[in-house]
Amino acid sequence: MRKSAILLFALATAVAGPGVATAEPRRDLDRARELIDDGFRALEAADTATAEHRFELATRLSPDLAPAWLGLAECHRLQGDNLRALHAARKAAEAAPGLASASYAIARILVELGSPSAALDAAARARELDPGNVDIRLFEALLLQQEGRSAEASERLGDAWDADLRDPRLAEELALLLVASQQTERALEIVDASLNVAPARPVLQFAKALLLAEDIDRQGEAEDWFRRALAAGIREPGRVHLELGRLLVETGREQNAVEELERARELLPQSPEVQYHLATAHRALGDSEQAGLALQAFQRLNQETEASERRTRELGIALNEAQTLAQDNRLAESLKRVDEILASYPEEPQAFAIRAKVLFSMARRREALTAAVRARQLHPGRVEYHYLEGLFLMHSSRPAEAEVALLRALTVEEDSAEVHALLAGALVKQERPGEAVEHFQRALDLGREGADLRLGYAGALESLGRQQESESQMEAYRALPR
C-alpha cells in the first residue's frame, strides 16, 4: 500500500525546488541541494547519522528547501524520535505549503505518536493537494477504517474510482469494503474491471471469490478463485483458507473443508471463527471428539475476547470515576482511585494525567510534575500531557523548561489556543516580550479569552513601547464581564 519514505521524499526533492527563495546566494542553494542528494543516498544505505548531518547542513544553508526538512523528519522517525520528526515535517510544510508529501509525512508521524484524529486531518490535506496520489488515498482510507468509519473510507475510495483513478491497489481495498457492506454489484464491477488490467493480483482474485461465494449458482467458480489467490501468494492466506473452508462446509464437502480450516487454524490460532467452522465440519463428519475440542477452543477464545473487552470497559468506568471525584473536589478519594487503576494498569497515560491534576490541586507540585511527565512519555502524541507539564513547570517558576514543553505541545497541535497563551506567559517571564506578543495574538485569534491573557498581552506590548496597542488590550480587559 505504501511507497517507501525514501521514494516519497525523493519525489518531493524533484518537485519542491521552484518554491525556494531566489534571494539566497546561488552557491549556497546549489550546495544545499547537493547535501540533500547525499542525505537521501545515505538513507538508502541505512546510514541515518550521515543522512541527518547532511540534511541539517542543508537546512542551515537554505531553510526554505522542504526536501531537507522531509529528509530530516525521516531520520528522526527512524531514530525513534517522533516529536522531532513531526517538528521537521511541519517545517517542510511551512517551507512548501502546497507540497502534499509534507502533509503526508505529518500524517504518518502523527499515527506513530498515537494521534489518529490529527493524522486524518493531515491526510485529508495531503489528498486535497495531490488528489491523484493513490498512496495518500489508501493511507486515509486505512485510518478511517481504524477509527470505525468504514463507510467514509469506502466513499473516499469510491470518489477516486469514479474520477478514473484506476489503480489496482485502490480497487482491491475498495472492493473489500464494498463486500463488507454487501454492495455486491458495484464491487463485482470494480473487481472485473481491475482484473482485466491486472489479472494476477491475489487480493483482486480473493475479492472476486468472496463475491461469487454469495451466489449459490457460482460457488464452484468461487472455489477456483480462492485457490488462484492462494497460488498467487496472497499476503494473508489464513483468511483465504478460512473463507474457502466455510464455502466447502456450505456445499457439503466437509472433509475438504477440514483440510482448509486446519491450515487456517495454523495461520490464525486466535480466531474463534476458524474453530467454530472446524467444529461444524467435524460434527457433519460424525467426529464428535474433534468437534468437541474445536468447540471448546471456540468458547475459550470467545471468553478471552469478552474478558479483554470487559477489562477495557472497566478501565473506562474507573477513569471516569476518578475524574468525577476530582471534579467534585474529593481529591483524596480520586487519588486513591487512580492509584488503584495504576496498580492494575501501570502504563495507562490517562490515569497519570488525572493523578497529576489531583496532586497539583493538593499543592503537591513536584509529584504532579512527575506524573505529568510520565503521561507525556507514555503518550507523546496527546497535546494535553505536554501542556500539563508546561503548566506545572510554570507554577514551579521554571519558565525556560516550560517553554520547551509547550513548544513540544505546539509540534503536536499547532492551533491550541491554551498552549499559545501559556507559552506567551513563559516568554514574558523570560523577558522576551517580542516573541510573547505573537503567541498572545495567536491565542486570541484561536478564540482564547480571559483577564490574564489581556493583561499579559498589554504588559508585553507596553514593554515594547507599543503604547496605543497596549491601551487597546487594557480596554478589552476592562470590558470583560466581572
Image (cartoon, rainbow, N blue to C red):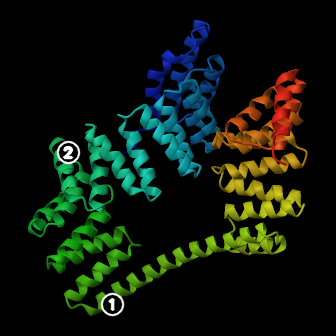
Instruction: From the viewer's side, name the closer residue of 290 and 10.
Output: 10
Q: What kind of residue is marked 1?
A: Gly
Q: Is residue 7 above or below residue 118?
A: above
Residue labelled with disc 2: 194
Q: Is residue 88 left or right of residue 159?
A: right
Q: Position of residue 143 (x, y in %)?
A: 45, 51
Instruction: From the viewer's side, name the closer residue of 442 and 190.
Output: 442
Instruction: From the viewer's side, name the closer residue of 5 and 366.
Output: 366
Q: Quadrant of the N terminus?
A: top left
Residue drawn at x 28%, y 37% is 163
Q: Is residue 205 left or right of residue 425?
A: left
Residue drawn at x 57%, y 41% is 78
Q: Position of residue 373 (x, y in %)?
A: 76, 54
Precedes in sequence: disc 2 or disc 1: 2
Q: Is residue 366 above or below residue 11?
A: below
Residue labelled with disc 1: 292
**Looking at the image, can residue 83 be seen?**
yes
Examine the image and state in which quarter residue 294 appears.
Answer: bottom left
Q: What kind of residue is marked 2?
A: Ser
- How much space separates mark 2 and mark 1, taking CA atoms? 43 Å
Residue drawn at x 23%, y 59% is 230
Examine the image and state in which quarter residue 375 appears.
Answer: bottom right
Q: Is residue 215 above or below residue 189?
A: below
SS of the residue under disc 1: helix
Q: How many marks?
A: 2
Label 1: few (<14), some (14–19) or many (≥20) C-alpha neighbours in 10 Å = some
Q: Give the number of the disc on residue 117.
A: none
Q: Is residue 76 left or right of residue 41?
A: right
